[in-house]
Image (cartoon, grey):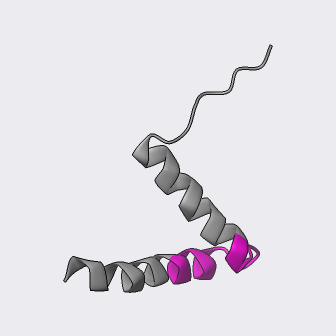
């Protein structure tokens, strides 16, 4: 049943972010949340400038 709630939770989160930041596009917000999930899941590496 949690699985059924996740899409509506994501939609609610996107809606709230877009209401708070009307200058951001839907695609930007969507990609931001994807990137945030990747960081949380540990699927990223630290980039170091030389």
Up the image or down, 1 lies above or below 36; here it is below
Q: How far from the left and from the top, in percent, is residue 48?
A: 70, 20
Would residue 39 appear left or right of 32 to someone viewing this image?
left
In this view, the residue in front, 20 or 38, is 38
Q: Is residue 31 magenta?
A: no
**Dominant SS type (magenta):** helix
In this view, the residue in front, 38 or 10, is 38
Residue at x 44%, y 77% (from the top left corner): 10
Numbered marks: total: 0
Residue at x 67%, y 27% (from the top left corner): 47
Residue at x 52%, y 54% (from the top left corner): 36
Tell me which corner region of the image, top left, top right, bottom left or bottom right, holds residue 7.
bottom left
Q: Which quadrant: the N terminus?
A: bottom left
**Furthest residue toward left:** 1
Up the image or down, 17 lies above or below 35; here it is below
Q: Is residue 26 magenta?
A: yes
Up the image or down, 17 lies above or below 50; here it is below
**Furthest residue toward right:** 50
Q: Which quadrant: the C terminus?
A: top right
**Furthest residue toward top:** 50
Q: Which residues are magenta?
A: 14-27
Residue at x 55%, y 63% (from the top left corner): 33
Q: How far from the left and from the top, in percent, is residue 30?
A: 61, 71
Q: How far from the left and from the top, in percent, is residue 21?
A: 66, 74
Up the image or down, 38 lies above or below 28; here it is above
């Amino acid at each position: 049943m949690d699985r059924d709630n996740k899409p509506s939770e994501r939609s609610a989160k996107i809606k709230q972010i877009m209401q708070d930041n009307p200058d951001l596009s839907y695609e930007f917000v969507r990609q931001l949340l994807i990137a945030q999930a990747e960081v949380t899941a540990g699927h990223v590496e630290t980039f170091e400038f030389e």
